[in-house]
Amino acid sequence: MSAPVTEDLRLSLAAQGFLALPEVFTPAEVGVVAAELDRLFGRFGELPPASVLDLGATGGDFGQDVPEILYPSVLSPALRQSAVFQRSRAFARRLLGPGTWFRFDHSIRKPPRCAYETVWHQDRVHKRSGLPERRLNVWIPTGKVGAEDGCMRYVPGSHLGGVLPHEAVPERRGAQRTIGVDESAAVDVPLPVGGAALHLFETVHSAHPNLGDRPRTAWILQFTQPRAGLPLASWAHQTLHIGHTWRWRHGKAREDHTRVD
């Protein structure tokens, strides 16, 4: 199951800055990803410090508000081997063109009755590399999402104005908020299981709070198409992260081996 990459999709992405695709994966394929992420979030307090963030309040208990796992596919290689990853990468390559490569992944979980919205922002504001490039994020929920569950929201065409002014959000860990967003133009993107929301690096977006009774978990994959130079800085960053998490991954592998025996 995969939506074909048509010229209309490419034109829509270029004009609107995002795509809403209701049928990209099968529920069973998403279930594989959900199980791996559930295992990681279940051990959130044991994960390496380099792998965890909390996007909630600075004064709250770390990991209780909006836990985030960086590079979950490093901690769980099964994610990189999944049909969801493979199809997302192929899809990104067909949208962005030759030379597109996987850059980064993370997973964000909003617990039930989580009051924290993801504030309006552009991912580009966090960019460290000076390389000219295009980036595409593939946002994959592990369950059905609507506005009440914390689905994505986009401002159509907002990517065309470059990087907009941002401000820090008081008492929120690391949050940068785009200044002056016209929410009247915002579009919600509810999705069924198997759907995905895609957006460009400059697109202004947010996500609703999760007011439902179950966790809202999303796996976000980022793909890049460099227009010049080699992305050595990003490769070095991934290698450094792999090194920082080696001890935890090695210990987990020994635990898994012991359970099998």
Image (tube, grey):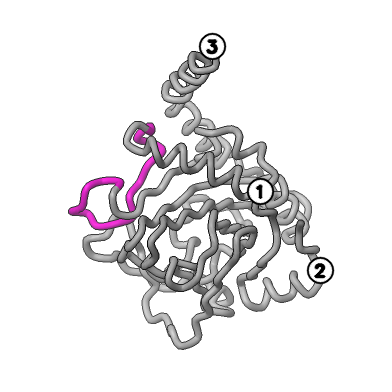
| Location of residue 149 (image quadrant) | bottom left
Asked whether residue 117 is drawn in magenta, I would say no
Viewport quadrant of the N terminus = bottom right
Q: Is residue 31 left or right of residue 169?
A: right
Label 3 element class: loop
Q: CA distance from mark 3 to mark 2?
A: 49 Å
Residue depicted at x 58% and y 79% = 157
Say whether disc 3 or disc 2 marks the residue closer to the N-terminus. 2
Amino acid beneath label 2: Thr
Which span of residues is magenta-colored?
Answer: 47-63
The image's mark for residue 6 is: 2
In this view, the residue farthest toward the top is 261
Q: Are marks 1 and 3 in contact (CB under 8 Å)?
A: no
Q: Secondary structure at mark 2?
A: loop
Dot 3, how many residues are within 10 Å of its Cα: few (below 14), some (14-19), or many (20+)?
few
Q: On the image, which quarter does residue 133 sit in?
A: bottom right
Q: Residues within 10 Å of mark 2 (few under 14, many from 20)?
A: few
Relative horizontal placement of residue 259, taking residue 172 as reference (left or right): right
Q: Position of residue 36 (x, y in %)?
A: 53, 39
Circle 3/circle 2 CB separation < 8 Å? no
Q: Would residue 60 be counted in the magenta stretch?
A: yes
**In the rendering, at what x and y percent does residue 86 appear?**
71, 45
| Residue 173, percent from left and from top | 29, 55
Q: Is residue 236 left or right of residue 181?
A: right
For the view shown, which residue lies furthest in the left direction?
59
**Residue at numbered disc 3:** 261
Label 1 SS = helix
Mark 1 Cα-neighbour bin, 10 Å: few <14, some 14–19, many ≥20: few
Instruction: Point out the frontmost of discs 3 and 2.
Output: 3
Q: Disc 1 marks which residue?
A: 28
Image point (50%, 30%), residue name: 242
Q: Of the residues under marks 1 and 3, which one precedes in the sequence?
A: 1
